[in-house]
Amino acid sequence: MSLRKLAAMAALVCLLLPLAGLAQSIVSGDVTGTVTDPSGAVVPNAKVTIKNDNTGETHTTTSNSAGVYRFALLKPGAYTLTANATGFQAVTQRAIVAVGQATQLNLNMGVTGASQTVEVTAETPIIQTENGNISTTYNTEHIELLPNPGNDVTYVAQTAPGVSTNTSSGGGYGNFTAFGLPATSNLFTINGNDAMDPYLNLNNSGATNLLLGANELQEATVVSNGYTGQYGRQAGAQVNYATKSGTNALHGNLVYWWNGRVLNANDWFNNNAGVPRPFTNANQWAASIGGPIIKDKTFFFVDTEGLRYILPTSQAVFVPSPAFQAAVLNNLTAVGQGAQVPFYQNLFNLYNNAPGIAGATPVTTGDMGCGDFPIGANVPCALTFRSTAGNNSNEWVLSARVDQNLGDTDKLFLRYRTDHGTQPTFTDPINPAFNAVSIQPEYDGQANETHVFSSNAVNQFILSGSYYSAIFKSVDQTTATGLFPTTMLWGGLFTTLGGENYVFPQGRNVAQWQVVDDFSLTRGNHTIKIGTTSGATTSAT
């Protein structure tokens, strides 16, 4: 399609857009309102200046003939607004900008005299009057104080309207559903870029199957029903995260969480089988620091987080009974297959030395685990016990961000994040040599540039890329095959021997890139916003 046709289509779209109150981008917010005098009459041509309280950056605009002003595509945070007009007192008020929302702040100016400062802060609106989106915003304090097992940042969405925890009966994918739509309909973004795993179309996560990074978040917004254009890509909830940046003040934190066996009840199935509470241990930490490199101009923020845990399993295990073992070995000798005896002796020895075997009891229900194997009347073929074999997992994250005020018209930030860890993909109840793991490195970077063409025209450009690897394999294939050279599948008679090594290695390497651009233009009483998103994913399996 030619550029001329594209321009014509864009112009047509602009003409069809609503006259006011169009949606904000998924990484920034707006501040809008009306400037009035003591009688309530509008004040046109008032000079309105907004200043970021943390970084000192400022923007200036002028109220239109209806007294309306608007600042578009602002970074989330606390701001101070000042209005000046000939013949009126200057007025100053504070406002909080939230992701994807417009903060309404009307400025009432007194008659000529000393300037005044009103210590009233316009918070994010509880009811969004500019559009039909159902939005819930969580600031830093909300995120920090929300009881959150594992500090998975997707967990905050479960307190939003219309959201419910997902279960296996609901498909089993993802952490939650919104208004009855499957979890694969949700979309997660960080600073405007997708944070999605394309394999199942779910939120991205690391080796612990958690999306770590809560200590880096400044704000999260959950849009359950998105009617405006920027939310048209998925039908479910849109969860937008904005990360912290450095400020003019040096700041940081150090946090540690611990959870262990003493704080948790035993599994119901363990109690029912008379198995004591197994060992559990989880250590999680987070640390961050941020501040100015050059005051009012260059800022940095660094965050690191990690988790190490030992997590037991709880599964029913079925192993050959002594009677079954003896019958098999005797039968091999009787039919002239004595050469196979060492193989089966090794097989039975692995079962007989499984962790927890001391608590095994005979299977006395149904066919007593025999299937069609003739062993004699009322002689059990299988023993059963509850396995609580544990496995280790670890993950750590490092992210760094630099914000630069290039001038009055250009703001830039760069963010880099790396995530590394080992996932306990499979825990074998017979021998830990048959365990499987996945080492999962991830790297992603982002550049975000905001350019102010004039007091009425602002553009925001985002470029990002990411790569992750998730290869599932045996802990040590040589050791595993040395213990048992194959995988024995009994068709439900006994627990599989040899683990799941017959399906490993497998996995994927995924690279993604994305370009996002949002443009905001104000003309009189009309505010027009146009945006585009494009990207690509490459995957090797």
Image (cartoon, rainbow, N blue to C red):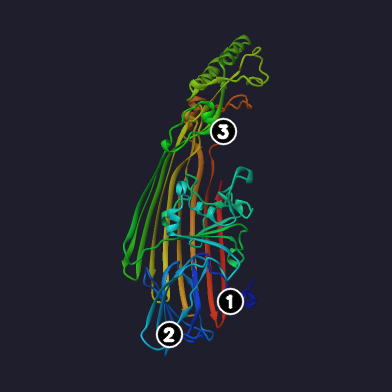
CA separation in Å, label 3 and label 1: 60 Å
Q: Residue flagged by tag 2: what amino acid is it?
A: Gly
Q: Which of the marked residues, 2 or 3, is nearer the chain's N terminus? A: 2
**Callout 2: SS:** loop
Q: Quadrant of residue 364?
A: top right
Image quadrant in which you'd find residue 250: bottom left
Q: How many marks?
A: 3
Q: Is residue 354 above or below residue 41?
A: above
Give the CA distance from mark 2 to mark 3: 79 Å
Q: Compared to 50, does 334 lie above or below? A: above
Q: CA distance from mark 1 to mark 2?
A: 27 Å
The answer to which of marks 3 and 1 sits earlier in the sequence is 1
Element on which disc 3 rests:
helix
User: Mark 2 — residue?
Assistant: 110
Image coordinates of residue 226 in percent, x first then y, are: 60, 63
Which residue is labeled 1 in the image? 20
